Amino acid sequence: MQLRTAALAVFVAAFVGMTGSATAPAAAVGATKATTVASATTTDGTTAAPSTTAGPARGTTAAPASAPAVPSLLHAAAADFPPAYAGYHTYAEMVTEIMATQAAHPDIVRISSIGKSYQGRDIWVAKISDNVGTDENEPEVMFDGLTHAREHISLEQTLAILRWLSSGYGTDPRVTSMVNTREIWIVFAVNPDGAEYDLTGSPFRNWRKNRQPNAGSTHVGTDINRNYGYHWGCCGGSSGSAASLTYRGPSAFSTPEARVIRDFMASRRINGRQQIRLAITFHSAGQQVLWPYGYTKTNVPYDMTVDDQAALASMGKAMAKLNGYKPMQSSDLYVTDGDEIDWAYGHERIWMYTVELYPTSGFYPPASILNRETLRNREAIYYLIEHSWCPWAVIGKATANCGPAFDDFESSTPWTTNPLGTDTATGGAWERAAPAATAYQSRTVPSGSRALVTGRLAGATVNSYDVDGTTSVRGPLVQLGATTGSLTFRYYFAHGANSSSADSFRAYVEREDGSRTLVKRELGSAKVDKPVWSTVSVPLARWAGQKIRIVFVASDVASGSTVEAAVDDVRITRP
Ligand SMILES: [Ca+2]
Ligand SMILES: [Ca+2]
Ligand SMILES: [Ca+2]
Ligand SMILES: [Zn+2]
């Protein structure tokens, strides 16, 4: 649940007595990269918390004040669900199930740890795909659960996905096709410490946050879903008080758990390209499908594109039709800042939804509803997996946006300025940025707010940050198919009346051997040319089957002219 900040006073009053004392920190565990693959036999005892180990009595603080070793912390928190909730999984039961699934389906399921919680529990991910040990060039999808401790049904939803895909492989054609053509990541429990602690109540503690102590406060825990570093704490959608259920933490990514997710997402950038296209973080309750952003009520703010918003909303509504939930922009429920989906979209361009599960309110539905209410989301989840081949297809932009190359320059990209080290520019080098306006530089860009620009700043005079010399920028290596579409891009080349035909904007197709073919050229002239965006389309048939890069070059050769250029929305279309 996202939890409306305005409702906090009530919750804090109700639960302030349950926060417990700050446990001494276990070894602070930094985030680690998501590459280590664990086998079922290397789980270092975390699977084997013996059921005979006596846990603390319910209602007492889970851990002693002195610093215990990590294993005893794990044992101390090994409480269980009461009988009516026996179908829910504790951390140990979850580990047992996912390891058993890997053992039963080793060809398509691989379990690994992507880092550790504050108290040292592994945060486990399953990769589900054919050739599971190989990083194939297949669209990737991510699911996660149990960010908020008391939202136990969200773990059950992630386990259900693992069960459907692993047991349906080879028998259900739809499942088989999804597993063969996608790489699906499931992070089962983002906040295992909080979830285990929640079970030490009578019977529950109504716990939401992680279990990280707060300096100078007796209140434990940070809301992991307010701790991500995108517009962190910007907009009244979180709290600065450690007592609050939506405490955002002392700084962005102060929680190990948010760092683990951040670093896992970053690890899925291959050659600068984010591989995960669509994602869901499961929460409860509310029965809603929510898309970014949470930090603002604006539908298409500066850090989103019109196409992205249209497709995000369209798919969100389609999923809601399939599960009967209510679709809306996250901030239409209430404003949140520093949450996971804002980070995923804003920083990583992973299109991530928050799905608030059953029921419409409250956190502890009995286990008897689990099968029905997780199954209810199956069609929506399969819809997301299948649409990951091209998220823009739902708005009719598959041909334009889902060819072998697409860059709107809104998030970090694999383009390199001065790739050969031969540029002579002393000013106005290409950069990916939101440009400031001058007479020759447009603040408005075709998509979102960023583009490739020759020196983003405005400066004291019109030529403070224009191009002086030659600057070049080169895109990533792109494999073209046997049949190929066109290179398309938006650009302008602007100059003052002091320009001449010695100045130019040029676009090249560069082969893998470095040889270049000029595909677009605009020369300067002795008249004012204002920054007006236009579209270029270049057929690429003569490079079919080859690997190419796109290169843009802007030149003020005499360094005496006022010259600016910009490029946005570089695409190689589908044939
Ligand atoms: Ca595969
Ligand atoms: Ca752009
Ligand atoms: Ca400039
Ligand atoms: Zn939640």
Image (spheres, grey):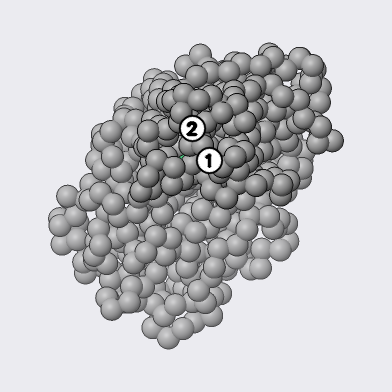
Which of 167 and 189 lies nearest the eye of the viewer? 189
Mark drawn on residue 560: 1
> Dot 2: few (<14), some (14–19), or many (≥20) neighbours within 10 Å?
some
Q: Which percent across, then down, holds residue 171?
A: 70, 25
Q: Which amino acid does label 2 sit on?
A: Asn
- Nearer-N-terminus badge (2/1): 2
Q: Does the residue labelled 2 lie within 8 Å of ligand 3?
A: no
Mark drawn on residue 291: none
Q: What residue type is labelled 1?
A: Gly
Q: Is residue 276 visible?
A: no
Asked if the residues shown at circle 2 and circle 1 are in contact, with their CB atoms under 8 angstroms apart, the answer is yes
Q: In this view, does 289 lie to the left or right of 41?
A: left
Q: Which percent across, then down, holds residue 461?
A: 37, 45
Q: Which percent across, then down, holds residue 255?
A: 43, 63
Q: Is residue 556 visible?
A: yes
Whether residue 213 is situated above or below residue 532 in the rendered picture:
below
**Residue 30 picture quarter:** bottom right
Identify the image quadrant of the N terminus: top left
**What residue would you read off at disc 2?**
498
Q: Which percent across, then down, holds residue 29?
A: 53, 70
